[in-house]
Amino acid sequence: MSLDALIRRALTDEIVTNFETERVRRDGELIQVSISTAAIHDADSAVYEVVAVVSDITERKRMEADLLEKEKLRLALNKEVELRNMRNRFMSMISHEFRNPLSVIVSSGDMLERYYARLSEESRSEHFANIRTYAGQLTDLLDDILALLRAESIGPEFKPAPVDLAQLCENAVGEARLKAQNQWQIHFANLVGQTIIKADEKLLRHALSNLLSNAMKYSPPQSVVSVKLWQDNRWFHIQVADQGIGIPPENLKRLFEPFYRAENVGDVPGTGLGLAITKQAVELHDGQLEVESAVGLGSVFTIYLPASLAT
Ligand code: ADP
């Protein structure tokens, strides 16, 4: 804006206007200035004077640029620290979560190879079952890691199609009940009827199964896990509530980051990947994942899916 234009605006708008620009000082140096103008009125409210104040703001601008630079540097450093932390968490997860199943597989394999003839039928079956279970655990682990890495490099696989949400929850609950083997009671309250939505069934199923298996993993046997599905104007809510160990408030904020685990997990095995994958699956549906928790009382995880997904 030119000074002329600024004065014209002051005349018409009758307000103080302010703008920043560059000017060449008399000694030839380029400086930054802020120009403010105001119209001054006489008693009849006619404008009789326009006042313009020009201030040299070069120093202020330089300090602002400095601050901005420092802030950028701070953010870059934070990112670097976060990356390092993630790498450390990844390495410690790999060494814990791979080593344990591998050593069981190796020792059961050894036992079978060396003492096959001497082992009872029952012991042989136990060793074979160990190998199957722990190899399965490793496969799940690899699948999770690959899903996350693939999503980061080429984007996640997302194939939405019509699916009955109530049925999907029913199936996930049924599967969890099988896993629970009567050790946990899994209640399901379905407050919507048949509800066809456009969603990626595999991803949603995986997300809900993760929440269900965490609810069991982090709560004592014989406790209740409650699943509730309901709908309001904006969202479908799928809620999984447990009566388990809960999550310390200071850990809640980062809970959905890959490889992050709360400090109260004790010996409970885990990778810190499930919730990151769950969150990703939910967000692909334009939904949200939220958690509320109280240490010692339990946790409530809620998947919000937009009501507009209904077909
Ligand atoms: P994992 O269970 O394999 O560690 P997740 O990504 O599924 O990984 O969960 C991340 C962390 O969140 C867990 O390590 C645990 O600290 C916490 N968490 C998740 N679900 C629950 C729950 N239902 N109750 C208590 N803590 C939980």
Image (spheres, helix red, strand yellow):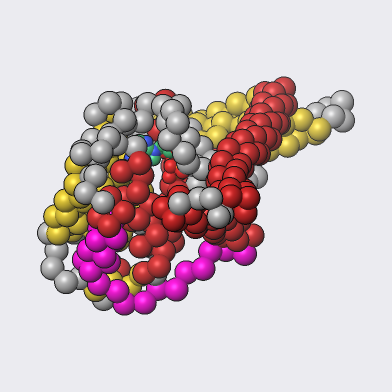
Tell me residue 211's x, y (percent): 34, 49
The span picked out in magenta is 154-176
Snapshot quadrant of residue 298: top left
Image x and y of residue 287, in percent = 36, 56
- Camera-side residue of 284 and 73: 284
Q: Residue at x 36, y 31 (%)?
A: 247
Name the residue rendered at 35%, 49% in the picture.
213
Residue 76: % across, % down: 68, 35
Q: Is residue 174 above or below residue 225?
A: below
Is 29 in front, or is 265? Answer: 265
Q: Is residue 307 above or below residue 274?
A: below
In the rendered image, the residue lying farthest to the right is 28
Q: Position of residue 102 (x, y in %)?
A: 60, 47
Q: Is residue 4 left or right of residue 22?
A: left
Left or right placement of residue 261 versus residue 80 in this view: left
Q: Please determine whether, in this image, residue 79 is positioned above or below residue 229.
A: above
Instruction: State whether residue 119 appears in this view.
Output: yes
Is residue 259 located in the magenta-colored stretch of the structure? no
Magenta span includes 171: yes
